Image: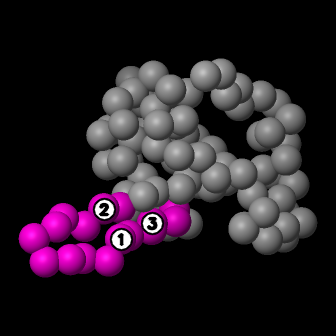
Amino acid sequence: MSLPLNQSSERDAKVSSTVGILPAIERHYTVAEVAILWNLSCDTIRRLFENEPGVVILTTATRRGKRRYKTLRIPESVLLRVHRQNVNALMFHK
């Protein structure tokens, strides 16, 4: 599965944030898609984005004796923001 984050998608994310396109129309990634893009485990991606503002978290209703499931959908603008923050943190950490 190849999901390139090319310059046009970055440009589209900048345009959508400045023009005010509805977040519901924005591309949302699954945890598995981001894990492939960033070459990290799904668990790591889940930890990175679970408490991030803007991430959509869908949960199943709890039933007696069953565990609750969480499904994360990560908007492209959040993906780019977290990536930028982590790259900046690495650059300043050196």
Residue 54 covered by magenta stretch: no
Which mark's residue is nearer the viewer, 2 or 3? Answer: 2
Q: Is residue 85 visible?
A: no
Rounded to the nearest angstrom, the CA distance separating label 2 from label 3 is: 10 Å
User: Between disc 2 and disc 3, whose residue precedes?
Assistant: 3
The residue wearing badge 3 is 57
Q: Percent position (x, y) of residue 73?
A: 53, 56
In this image, 14 relative to 33: left or right?
right
* Rendered location of residue 93, percent (x, y): 37, 31
Q: Which residue is drawn at 39% across and 27% down?
A: 40
Kindly indicate whether the residue at mark 1 contacts the one at mark 2 (C-beta within 8 angstroms).
Answer: yes
**Residue toward you, 33 or 22:** 33
Looking at the rendered structure, the kind of residue marked 2 is Tyr
Q: Please name the amino acid that badge 1 sits on.
A: Thr
Residue shown at 58%/41% (left/top)? 84
Which residues make up the magenta segment?
55-70
Query: SS class of the residue under badge 2?
Result: loop
Residue 25 location, x and y as percent? 78, 63
Residue assigned mark 1:
60
Circle 1 Cα neighbour tier, 10 Å, few/some/many (<14 / 14–19 / ≥20): few
Disc number placed over residue 69 in the picture, else none = 2
As measured in the structure, the alpha-carbon distance from the residue carrying label 1 to the one carrying label 3 is 10 Å
